[in-house]
Every structure is written in structure tokens, then in C-alpha cells.
Amino acid sequence: MAHLPNPSGFPGIGGLFAYRPETARPLRELAQQLLRGASSLSPGERELIATFVSSKNACRYCTRSHAAVARKLLSPEVVDAVLADAETAPIAPKLRALLAIANAVRGPVGAVPDGLMSAARDLGATDLELHDTVLVAAAFCMFNRYVDGLGADTPDDGPGYEQGAVRLTEQGYVPK
């Protein structure tokens, strides 16, 4: 149940952004930088991390919307496999190690275990990739809590998420 009025009618975080546009702008810019800014992780990999964290946090809106984007940037089979079981999904070992780090970030607050960081480094993860993984995971914990904490509308319809994914892949997170 929504805890705030949503006169815009936009689902999920879009309705919250419409409710408070002055906070929407910096949050959109943060998402743009994290998911589309310069990084050795591809936008698809970063969207997959956002999807994975949102799924583990049980945020249906963020999981559905970012999974739709990740499916466009990677492949539906890869995204669905990660959502089913990241340990057996057909992804590179380095990405699997980064997802383990993302999962640790979304858990109880505290440092990511050294062993997870070492394992990712041993598989070729750079300091920048470790940084970006932790920041994407942490930001999506915030976005997930924002959406679910205020009870934002979470539609079940697949076409709406697909339309949003097209817009996000073509235009990014900051409307022109």
C-alpha cells in the first residue's frame, strides 16, 4: 500500500521522483553515474548487480525494472539464470565473485570479508571494479528501501517494464 499520494500515476520510483523532484534529480544523476558512467564493468554487468541486489532485497519493482534493462544489455538467459542461482549461472567467474561481494554489501552492515575481496582480485577484478560493485550494491539497497519503504506502486505487467527498459537503455537515467 502506498504511503504517499501519487498524482503522477508513475509506478515505482518514478512516482516517488514525481512527488519530490528536488530529490529526484540527484538520485537520477547518481544512478546515471553508477550504471552508465565510466567503468571497466559494462553497463549490463552493473545493471545485473543492481538486479541481483534488488532481488536479494525482495524489492519487486527494482528487480523487475532493472532485470528488464539487464536482459536488453546482456541476455534474458543470463539474467534469469543469475536470478535463479548466481552460483550456477553461466557468467564469468569474476562476475560471480563480484555478485558475492554485492550480496555481502546488502547483508548486515560491516566490511566485506577479506576473502571475498581476495577471491575477486584473484579472478582479475580491479580496485575500480571492487569499488563500483560495492557502490552499486550500496546504492541499490538505498533505492530498494526508498521504493518499498514508501510502498511505491509495483505493477505486475511485463510490457511496462519492457517499455521502461527501452527508455533507460536509449536515454539513461537523467531525462533530457
Image: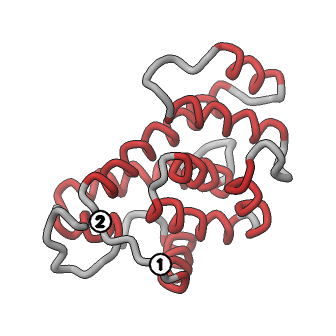
Is 176 drawn above or below residue 100 in the view shown? below
Q: Residue furthest bottom?
A: 159
Residue 161, percent across and down?
Answer: 51, 77
Q: Residue at x 54, y 81 (%)?
A: 158
Q: Circle 1 sits in a helix, a strand or a loop, which is it? A: loop
Is 108 drawn above or below residue 150 in the view shown? above
Label 1 amino acid?
A: Asp
Residue bearing the label numbered 2? 152
Quadrant in the picture for residue 116: top right
Left or right: 40 in relation to 150: right
Left or right: 53 in relation to 144: right
Residue 147, percent across and down?
Answer: 33, 57
Q: Residue at x 16, y 79 (%)?
A: 7
Residue bearing the label numbered 1? 156
Q: Circle 2 sits in a helix, a strand or a loop, which is it? A: loop
Colour scheme in use = secondary structure
Label 2 amino acid?
A: Ala
Residue placed most toward the observer, 101 or 127: 101
Is 68 drawn above or below residue 98 in the view shown? below
Residue 167, percent across and down?
Answer: 50, 77
Q: Does the CB distance between marks 1 and 2 fall below 8 Å?
A: no
Q: Residue at x 57, y 55 (%)?
A: 51
Q: Residue at x 76, y 23 (%)?
A: 121
Q: Residues within 10 Å of mark 2 (few under 14, many from 20)?
A: many
Q: Which mark is residue 91?
A: none
The N terminus is located in which quarter? bottom left
Distance between mark 1 and mark 2 Cα atoms: 13 Å
